[in-house]
Every structure is written in C-alpha cells, then in structure tokens.
Amino acid sequence: MRKFLFTLVLATVAFSSYAIDSGQAFDDPEMQARYEGIISEVRCLVCQNQTIKDSNVFLAADLRREIRRMLAEGMTDGEIAEFLVARYGEFVLYRPPMSGKTLILWLAPPLLIGFGLVVVIRVLRRRMSMPLDDEVGQGSG
Amino acid sequence: MSRFLVPMLAFAIMIPIFIVGLGRNKSEIPSPLLDQQAPQYALPSLQDLDVIVGSDTYAGEIALVNVWATWCGGCRTEHSYLMQLAGRGEVPIFGLNWRDQRAPALGFLQQLGDPYSAVAYDEDGRVGIDWGVYGAPETFLIDADGTVLYKHITPMTEQVWQEKFLPRIQAARARVQ
C-alpha cells in the first residue's frame, strides 16, 4: 500500500512538471532566473487568471518563446515589458506600472484600508464613551 | 439623519462603479494598437508560399484584416458572413491565417469559399504577437494610411458591421475628401 501511494505521488509530481515546458531555457542561472521572473509576471490573455508560466495554451508558449528570444538578444526586463504592453496593453502585466490609468488600482487598497480603520476607530470611540446605563437599558441600535 | 449620511454617500459612489464593472466584458481587452500605425508584416501567401503577402499588399486603401484559423469555431461561424461581405465588395478583406496548418486551411477555403483578397500564412504566430492577437477570430479595420481604426474580437456579424465598422469607414472616407 505504502509503495503504491509513493508511486502515485511520484507519478503526479512527474505529470505536473511535464505539463509545461519547464526545462532550462538558459544555461546561465542568472538569465534563467530573469526568464522565470518575467514569465511569472505576464498574464496569459486566453486564460486570464494564469501567468504564461503556468499556462500551456499555445499563445503562452509563443510568448515564452518570444521572451526567451528577447532575453538572448540582450534586451532589458523593461524593454521586454514595453514590447508586451505595446501589443497587448497594460493588462498583460500582473504588476502594471503606476500611471494615470492604473493609479486607482494602486491607490484603492490603502485608501479602503484607511477608510475602514477610520470607521472602526469612530465606532469603538463611540461605544467606549457611551453611558453605562444605556447598555443595560432598552439597548440602543 | 446625519449618521446615515456617510453610508449613503459610500453607497451612492460604489453602486455606479459596480454597475460599470459588471457591464464590462472582461474577455474583450481594448487594443493598444487603436489609432496607431498597424504593425508591418510580410509573410508567405497561404495559397502560394513563394508569393509574399503583407501590409504592403493593402497599403493605400481601407481594408479589413481578419485573423482566422481552422481550429477556431468562431471563424467557421463568421465565415458565411465574410463571404457575404466580400460579395458586396465594400472593402477588401485580407486574411491572416494564424497558428494553423496549411493543408486544412486550404481545405477550409476550398470547401466554404474564399472571401479573402489574399491570405498571409502566420505559421508560428510571430505576426499574431505583433498584432496583439490573443483569440481568433479578430478583425481589424485599417485606414488607407495604415492606421488601426477599430478592432473587433469574436465573429463578425451584420450588426457589428453596421454599428462599428461602417461609421468608421464613412468617417475615414470623409476625411480624405
């Protein structure tokens, strides 16, 4: 039984790594790290909630091939991002640069957290300053 | 009354945002190519690999560039409409056969008819990437000077033609005169 489970686990692991061309793209570990960094930041537009690193549709494979080519040609990460944005729009990047169009995207989380904190603090303050007999009494809403 | 002011204000701001968000079709991403110069390309013709077809082929006239493939169901759906559109002869339609195999692509045109003035054969999808193609069928409206006037994703229909393409074509023609 144990042996069977072990085989099963091994088989599953083997398949998951087989699904996408995860082989080394570059011999140079630094280039390989850059390559993997880029492809895990680029959205697959066919399957929008996946990166092109995780997707095996052919468009993702094509984009990985292009990115490999551009890296090999010595383009910088910024130039590669520019190349992709010029063709597919900023939506293609999981972390779009801060600009007029994406400002609300970047500012919304801190603003919402700040707003929530203000509400919580105000509610707590009010509760603390409530007269005791109010709590025991008819119960205000 | 004033204690309800803040929640009501927040509600009034958020509801329009949600309505707009829900109404948007997330699979349609606006193309950054709009109002830009369409990417140049030169590819072998699907019918005759020795002939080169590309952006130069339709330079100087308003044209449609239609991205299609035999594996794409929507392309089959829109094909009869493209035939009809080509028959009317309003604008030439140029095909970009994207990430396809040549034999079935030729068979497709032989069987269902060929609405295209010429078809470029983009076997490895390089030109598709330059055009920001991510799902066929896609149809681009190109002005005589090579500017991208409009991009439509999903099959072409008479309604799309009337509402989106015709007004832009008429406006482009009016600008020239």
Image (cartoon, rainbow, N blue to C red):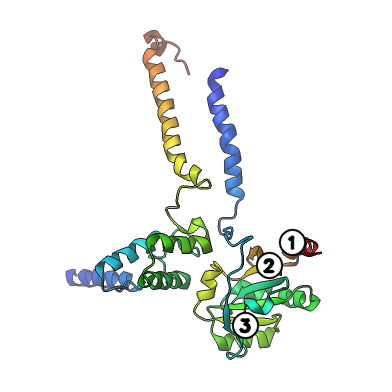
Using the rendered view, name the quadrant where residue A110 is placed.
Answer: top left
Circle nearer the N terminus (1, 3): 3
Circle nearer the N terminus (3, 2): 3
Q: Residue A16 versus residue B24: which sits nearer the camera?
A: B24
Instruction: Judge from the rendering whether residue A93 lies leftward or rightward of residue B100; answer left or right.
Output: left
**Quarter of the picture holding the N terminus of chain B:** top right
Q: Which residue is mark 1?
A: B168
Q: Which residue is mark 3?
A: B53
Label 2 SS: strand
Circle nearer the N terminus (2, 1): 2
CA distance separating discs 1 and 3: 25 Å
Using the rendered view, name the quadrant where residue B17 is placed.
Answer: top right
Q: Residue at x 79, y 73 (%)?
A: B90
Residue type at mark 3 is: Val
Instruction: Determine the chain carrying the residue at label 3.
Output: B
Rendered position, A106 above or below B34:
above
Rendered position, B5 above or below B148:
above
Q: Which of pointers 3 and 2 indicates the residue nearer the eye?
A: 3
